[in-house]
Amino acid sequence: MENIDIKGYERKEIGKQLSKRLRLEAKVPCVMYGGKEKLHFYIPMAYLKDLVYTPNVYFINLEIGNKTYKTILQDIQFHPVSELVLHIDFLEISDDKEIKMMIPIVFRGESPGIIKGGLLTKSIRKLRVKGLPENIPSKIPVDVSTLELGNTAKIKDIKIENYEILMPKQIPVAQVVVPRALKSKQTAASSEEPVEQSANGNDNDKQK
């Protein structure tokens, strides 16, 4: 997985009033846990663009003071109206301890069902996984090269290595659906096929 460097600034005081003042100054209150103790700090909003407003996930080298911590993004709180970042939780990680993360899916391959006019509908965009940091992928590939019209790819069909997907295996990830226009075309084509009469039926008609 790729790394991204973020600089934060430690804050000695905490509380709602201080957090409100930081936000007015375009700074985001943050906390890091997972290590020996919680660390309260803030990050200027401008530093978060490449971390927050992206579908990608990263390991974060968080520089605070004269120390750098290896972390992951654990939780983000957004304002319900403006969608500005209100607060961020970071989790300090170590190479020998398993972590849990939400990892985005990427679809690969050319589906024969899509070639025939089907549409690929995506049921899930991210999967929750567990593993050592070195084994966590930046994206989870899902092969759709065998999906015909009406076929579904499920979590159980995903090939994984050295990590675990923490979601039921029968959950669908994507499906090649038949569009309404294509269904109408298929129905019209089938209705135009000639109806073959049996030999016995012809004989009975002659006898009449």
Image: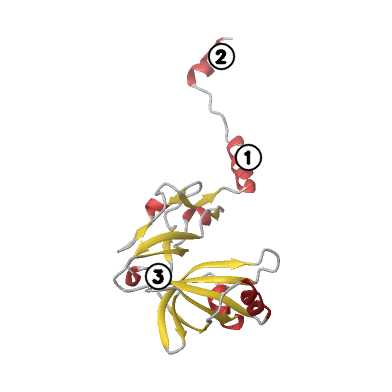
Which of these two is toward me, 28 or 45?
28
- Judged left or right of residue 195, residue 144 is left
- Judged left or right of residue 196, residue 86 is right
CB under 8 Å between callouts 1 and 3? no
Relative to 176, say whether 95 is above or below: below
Relative to 200, say whether 99 is above or below: below
Q: Check residue 188 in the rendering and tell me which mark sits there, or answer none.
A: 1
Image position, residue 34 (x, y; %): 40, 70
Neighbourhood count class around disc 2 (C-alpha, 10 Å): few under 14, some 14–19, many 20 upward: few
Relative to 2, say whether 205 is above or below: above
The three-letter code of the residue at mark 3 reads Gly
Image position, residue 75 (x, y; %): 51, 66
* Residue located beneath label 3 in the image: 34
Q: Secondary structure at mark 2?
A: helix
Quarter of the image with the N terminus is bottom left
Neighbourhood count class around disc 1 (C-alpha, 10 Å): few under 14, some 14–19, many 20 upward: few
Instruction: Answer with mark 1 or mark 3, whichever residue precedes in sequence.
Output: 3
Which of these two is toward me, 84 or 142?
84
Q: Check residue 206 in the rendering and tell me which mark sits there, or answer none.
A: 2
Question: Label 1, label 3: how many angstroms apart (C-alpha)?
Answer: 62 Å
The residue at the far right in this view is: 81
